[in-house]
Each structure stands twice: as C-alpha cells, then as structure tokens.
Image: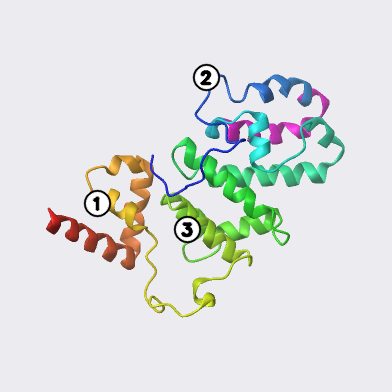
C-alpha cells in the first residue's frame, strides 16, 4: 500500500511484521488480569487489536504511544485512569483502522500519539482535533494523506497555524485540493492497486463530492494522456 507517511523505522518501530503472534504477551496475561479485575478486560481488548493491526508486540506498542506503564494490573485501583487509557487507545485504533497497510497504520498511531503529547491536548481534545473541519484529519487518513491529516489535526488542536495565518500565498482564495499530486498520479495511472482497494474507493467517493479534487484529478489525467 502507498501512503504519504514518511516516518521511517526507528528503534521502537519493530520493522517488518514478525512471525510470532503480536498479541501473545497480552493474551497470556488476560486470564490473570480478568480474574484480578474485570475492568481491565476492555482495555486489553483494544490493546490487542492495536497490536494486531500494527504488528507490534506489547512493548513496541507502548513505546510508540509514549506509555511508560508496563504493568496493567497497577491500573486496577484507578478506574478514572483505566477509562482515560481505554478512550485513548480506542481513538488510536479508530484512526489506524481507517488506513490500509501495516506501515501506514503504524504511522497514524505514532502521529496521533505525538499529537496527544501536546500540553493542551487531552483525550477529548485529541478526538475533537481528529474530527474537526470540513475535511477532517480522519477523512484525510482515509484518502491515504496521512501527513496532511496530521497537519489539519494540529491546526484544529491550536498547536499549529493554518496556512492563511502564516502569511500571504498565491493559493489564497482558491478551493482546497485534498489529494497530493503523487496520489493523484497513482489514482489515474495503471498502478491504482498500490493505493489499496479501500483507499481507492474512498478517493473515488471523495472526488464525487469535491469539485476542487475532481478538477485536479481530471486535469492531471488529461495531462498524462497528452504526454504519452
């Protein structure tokens, strides 16, 4: 799958998918934790699903979301913290599940976790930032435009300036095109399958409702046809 996420592997990324079961660690402790406090079951369920779609083991997941807590059983005495953690992981899972490919999903999780570390962004603020706008960060993710989605979320959270606040631009006043040129080229070319079936369908649906993107796609399609 092709996305615009350029985050390369780091010391916690985990690299390619491993052959072991990525949810093994949590699955093994599930019976013990469930017996100890059933309030942890929902939290572990979500963590397991995140591990499954990213291919990270438990420690890699916790490292990449910036969590220092390694003993879930210690949460049992703090129901409010359990709820915060569960909401946070559910938000990451929802965002990551909107893109295709393990690398893209890891990129979304890391970018959202990074956004959540801003002093002004709590869990509710993260949800609001990802959902805000005529075309929200979550919608950008569905188009494969992960970096653009993060920028939109950062502006929505108030930790980055919108383009028009930075200074005059020759594009001021023009309709916003939500698709990058490389993605448009893949979409109109012979390698559309690289986008992923669901992403390509999302782009097609978006174009039908966005005149600016429809014009950009058709203009690029004609330019490529004329160059052949």
Tell me the residue at 61%/35% (across/down). Answer: 11
Considering only vertical position in the picture, is 165 above or below 203?
A: below
Tell me if residue 47 is in the magenta stretch: yes
Taking 14 as reference, is 137 above or below it?
Answer: below
Give the labeled residue for mark 3: 148
Cα separation between marks 1 and 2: 36 Å
CA gap, disc 3 and disc 1: 20 Å
- Start-end of magenta stretch: 34-51
To which residue does mark 1 refer? 188
Give the residue number, with chain letter if any, for mark 2.
Answer: 19
User: Residue 5: image x %, image y %?
Assistant: 47, 48
Q: Quick check: 110 left or right of 118?
A: left
Q: Secondary structure at mark 3?
A: helix
What SS does tag 1 mark?
Answer: helix
The answer to whether residue 195 is magenta is no
> Going by the image, does 101 lie left or right of 124?
left
Q: Quadrant of the N terminus?
A: top left
């Amino acid at each position: 799958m092709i996305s615009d996420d350029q985050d390369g592997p780091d010391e916690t990324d985990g690299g390619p998918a491993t052959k072991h079961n990525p949810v093994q660690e949590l699955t093994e402790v599930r019976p013990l934790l469930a017996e100890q406090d059933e309030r942890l079951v929902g939290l572990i369920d979500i963590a397991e699903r995140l591990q499954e779609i990213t291919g990270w083991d438990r420690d890699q997941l916790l490292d990449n979301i910036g969590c220092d807590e390694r003993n879930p059983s210690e949460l049992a005495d703090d129901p409010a913290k359990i709820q915060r953690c569960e909401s946070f992981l559910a938000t990451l899972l929802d965002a990551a599940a909107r893109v295709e490919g393990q690398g893209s999903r890891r990129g979304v999780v890391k970018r959202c976790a990074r956004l959540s570390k801003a002093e002004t962004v709590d869990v509710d603020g993260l949800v609001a930032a990802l959902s805000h706008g005529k075309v929200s960060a979550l919608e950008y993710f569905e188009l494969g435009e992960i970096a653009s989605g993060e920028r939109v979320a950062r502006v929505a959270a108030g930790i980055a300036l919108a383009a028009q606040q930075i200074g005059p631009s020759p594009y001021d006043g023009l309709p916003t095109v939500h698709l990058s040129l490389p993605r448009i080229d893949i979409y109109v070319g012979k390698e559309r399958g690289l986008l992923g079936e669901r992403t390509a369908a999302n782009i097609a649906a978006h174009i039908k409702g966005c005149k600016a993107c429809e014009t950009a796609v058709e203009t690029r399609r004609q330019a490529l046809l004329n160059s052949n």
